[in-house]
Amino acid sequence: MLYVGLDYHVMKSVFQVLDENGKKLFPKTIHGPAEKLLDELSKLPRPFEICFEASCSCGFLHDKLLSIAKRVVVAHPGKLRLIFRSKHKNDRADAEKLAKLLFLGEVPPAYVPTSDIRSWRSMIEHRDRLIRERTRAKNALKGLFRSRGVTIKKRLWSKTGLSWAESVVFDNSFDAVRRDDLLERIRSLNNMIRRVEKELDAIGKKHPGVQILTSIPGIGARIAEAVMAYIDDPWRFRKNKSIGNYFGLVPSEDTSSSVIRLGHITREGPPTVRRLLTEGAWLAVRKSPTVRRYFERIASKNPKKRKIAVIATAHYLLRVMLAMLRAGECWREKTA
């Protein structure tokens, strides 16, 4: 059995090979795309295991390597830095470290979802980018009207409101061009968002996990599908509390002896899900007596604690969601 550590880049990669005794055989540098790298790796004596660090293209590379390697391990980059802290860092050294960790069986693994789940996540992130782009265009249009003293009509983003915005007369052609460009962008983004949401709805209606999560008051299809896509397999978490770490909703901690210091949340994991969960938490507080009681207990009638309380509520909802998915049960309100 050979053990291969791979430091992968788009047009340059380095891999280091260790034998069954952990002895270094040879490093090799590959200049070229992934296809050339895979061709060189396929020439290695079989069987071999391979390890590389997670990146934005790790899913694609993981699937390709499975066809030639006996075992493929994707290393968690954050945990990897905790294991190997060195001032001597280059591609060859990184590949050697990965090979050694693979040989010792000490690679901190990262979860690699299937191709369908990765595509689902990408669609959710794509919608989020479109929403943010549309918000910027809407704010720019409002800013244009206000800067020219135009009183903005109610329901500006309806068809009637957009038609009114198109009919506004400005003193110069520059403002009219800006207005027309922003209106065209908003309408185009509306169409793109509708198309994306149609695809997401088709997935969500068939996914039992999404249907379970939407039973929570205040949690709509967009929030449920985002949480479900990133959880993927609810049994991959050792316990319910660990899901807060995954989504970055736990406070950072600096504890020494009896002194405990808690800071801001870690913000690890997907920011899109964290943002949607926070919005869902505010809605759930208004719609669910159970969630409202939890929120009020944390807030303690102190206005300064409301933001802390809503983050704690989002974390609470995440734990509840994971428990619901594991049990296959819908939301049940707790009686006071």
Image (spheres, rainbow, N blue to C red):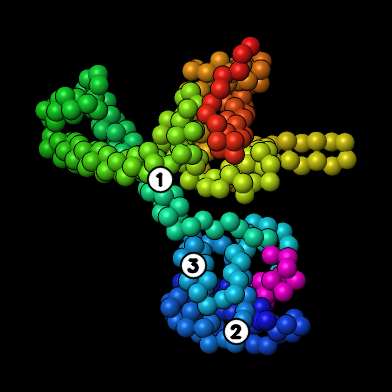
Please check the rendered image and state whether residue 134 is part of the magenta-colored stretch, yes or no: no
Q: Position of residue 322 (x, y in %)?
A: 59, 37
Q: Position of residue 37 (x, y in %)?
A: 49, 80
255 or 310: nearer the viewer: 310
- Residue identifier under label 3: 63
Q: Position of residue 70 (x, y in %)?
A: 59, 75
Q: Quadrant of the C terminus?
A: top right
Residue depicted at x 61% and y 46%:
235
Residue depicted at x 62% and y 79%:
48
Which of the 4 image quadrants contains residue 3? Answer: bottom right
Q: Which residues are magenta?
A: 93-107
Q: Which amino acid, mark 3? A: Asp
Residue 19 as seen in the image, left or right of residue 321: right
Residue depicted at x 56% and y 15%:
289
Residue 46: image tag:
2
Which of the 4 image quadrants contains residue 53? Answer: bottom right
Q: Is residue 18 above or below residue 284?
A: below
